[in-house]
Amino acid sequence: QVHLVQSGGGSVQPGESLKLSCAASGSTSSAYGMAWFRQATAKEREFVAAINWNGGLTSFGDSVKGRFTISREDGKNTMYLQMNNLKAEDTGVYYCALDESYYGGRSVDGYPYWGQGTQVTVSS
């Protein structure tokens, strides 16, 4: 059974940075895609960023392009989301996700495994 444990998050002011981590365990696949999604209050879960099995392919939502970076450290089975120049509209619960294929894509439907979620609040 795949298990994802998230860390990071918190409250920051606009313009500041945060880094989220997601540690994976239990996967039977040697190559899997991962992603970050977020959900603001009363809104649908939104795609943030995705990365393929070897880090050679990344994709970002339009609202975070140029500000967020996704990476992975396979020796630690961990994925990261570096968030810079945060804005109030980045506020929400951030979820990591995993799909046991080379690349899960940009849709929530592509990911059967999810982390517990972590709150990110950007406010002055």
Image (spheres, grey):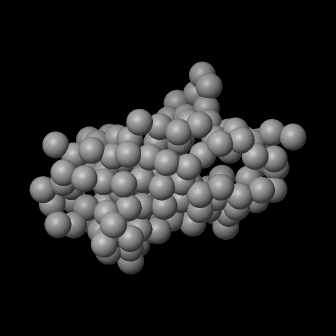
The image quadrant of residue 119 is top right
Q: Is residue 103 above or below residue 107?
A: below
Residue depicted at 58% across the width and 27% down the height: 43
Judged left or right of residue 6, residue 112 is left
Foreground pick, 29 / 9: 9
Residue depicted at 30% across the width and 54% down the height: 24
Judged left or right of residue 9, residue 21 is left
Residue depicted at 71% across the width and 58% down the height: 17
Residue 105 in percent (x, y) is at: 36, 55
Judged left or right of residue 106, residue 40 is right
Q: Quadrant of the C terminus?
A: top right
Res. 60 visible in picture: no
Residue 70 in percent (x, y) is at: 50, 64
Residue 32 in percent (x, y) is at: 25, 61
Residue 61 in percent (x, y) is at: 56, 54
Report how many numbered discs are placed on residues in the image: 0
Residue depicted at 44% across the width and 46% down the height: 6
Q: Quadrant of the N terminus?
A: top left
Res. 87 visible in picture: yes
**Which residue ends up furthest to the top in the rendered image?**
42
**Which residue ends up furthest to the right in the rendered image?**
124
